[in-house]
């Protein structure tokens, strides 16, 4: 890890009933990271620090000079962050982690599958891939317990309307009749259906042209990795967030 940087909290905004978004100003300090990486962060001067994935892309930081984090407010430290006023100083150490968007991407479809706050590093990767003008389709399969718990949903839907992202949402708890997305946990059949439009009609091996990035709870990711392998994606093209291992 690098030395500790002290950043200024610019604002905290609600992302959902269990999450908030923190924006911190780099104050002209140089900070280089790869899309998908994390930092260890805490309030300046406090001993307690926790790992948080960076939710913005390197291309965003070059433009705004700010870092963005998605924080779960149901955890003790996350709830503390949600109550902080602008101007508070944050200590950030990093970047860290090997769950990253490759520096060189082959021109194949990208599949991002996330749940909960696991969407944070995936958002970073998606935004970076778009900034690089990735030529192949980009798909996000996003799971939450309830419709209100999706973070960055307006942004993802805007990208979908502009034809830059294929978005599939699924909820695992009962939802009302107005919900038009998928229902239930992610299954092999759903993954197959999601990746089908991204495949070349000449593909002989089902799913072999997809590069997959999976992030969420350890159980969520372990189950997903097995399902993605079952549809034919080689292990070398399945990237997994291993922070919780």
Image (cartoon, rainbow, N blue to C red):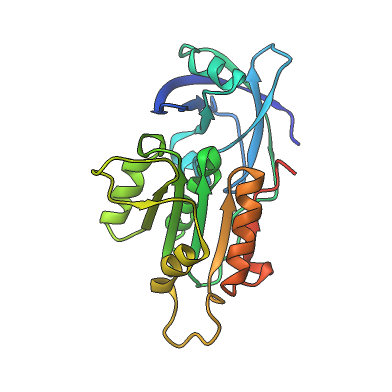
Task: Give the quarter of the image for residue 179.
Answer: top left
Q: Is residue 151 visible?
A: no
Q: Nearer the viewer, residue 211 or 94?
A: 211
* Picture mark count: 0
Q: Position of residue 31 (x, y in %)?
A: 61, 36
Asked if residue 6 shows in the view, the reply is yes
Outermost residue toward the left?
Answer: 178
- Give the x, y percent position of residue 127: 45, 50
Residue at (65%, 34%) from the top-left corner? Answer: 39
Instruction: Identify the residue at horizontal 52%, vertical 49% (top origin).
Output: 114
Tell me the quarter of the picture where residue 226 sits. bottom right
Locate the C terminus and report the quarter of the image it occupies: top right
Q: Nearer the viewer, residue 224 or 239?
A: 224
Furthest residue in direction front, as rendered: 174
Q: Is residue 71 above or below residue 98?
A: above
Q: Is residue 50 above or below residue 30?
A: above
């Amino acid at each position: 890890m690098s030395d500790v940087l002290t950043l200024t909290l610019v604002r905290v905004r609600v992302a959902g009933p269990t999450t908030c978004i923190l924006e911190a100003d780099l104050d002209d300090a140089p900070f280089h990271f790869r899309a998908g990486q994390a930092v260890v962060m805490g309030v300046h001067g406090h001993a307690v620090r926790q790992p948080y994935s960076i939710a913005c892309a390197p291309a965003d930081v070059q433009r705004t000079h700010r870092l963005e984090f998605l924080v779960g407010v149901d955890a003790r430290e996350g709830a503390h962050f949600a109550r902080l006023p602008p101007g508070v100083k944050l200590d950030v150490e990093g970047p860290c982690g090997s769950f990253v968007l490759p520096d060189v991407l082959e021109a194949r479809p990208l599949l991002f599958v996330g749940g909960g706050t696991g969407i944070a590093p995936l958002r970073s990767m998606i935004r970076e891939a778009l900034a690089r003008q990735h030529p192949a389709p980009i798909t996000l399969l996003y799971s939450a317990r309830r419709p209100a718990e999706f973070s960055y949903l307006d942004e993802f839907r805007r990208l979908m309307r502009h034809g830059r992202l294929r978005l599939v949402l699924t909820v695992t708890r009962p939802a009302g009749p107005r919900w038009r997305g998928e229902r239930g946990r992610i299954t092999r059949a759903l993954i197959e259906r999601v990746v089908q439009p991204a495949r070349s009609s000449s593909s002989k091996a089902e799913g072999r042209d997809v590069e997959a990035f999976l992030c969420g709870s350890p159980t969520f990711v372990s189950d997903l990795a097995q399902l993605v392998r079952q549809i034919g994606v080689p292990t070398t093209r399945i990237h997994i967030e291993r922070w919780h291992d």
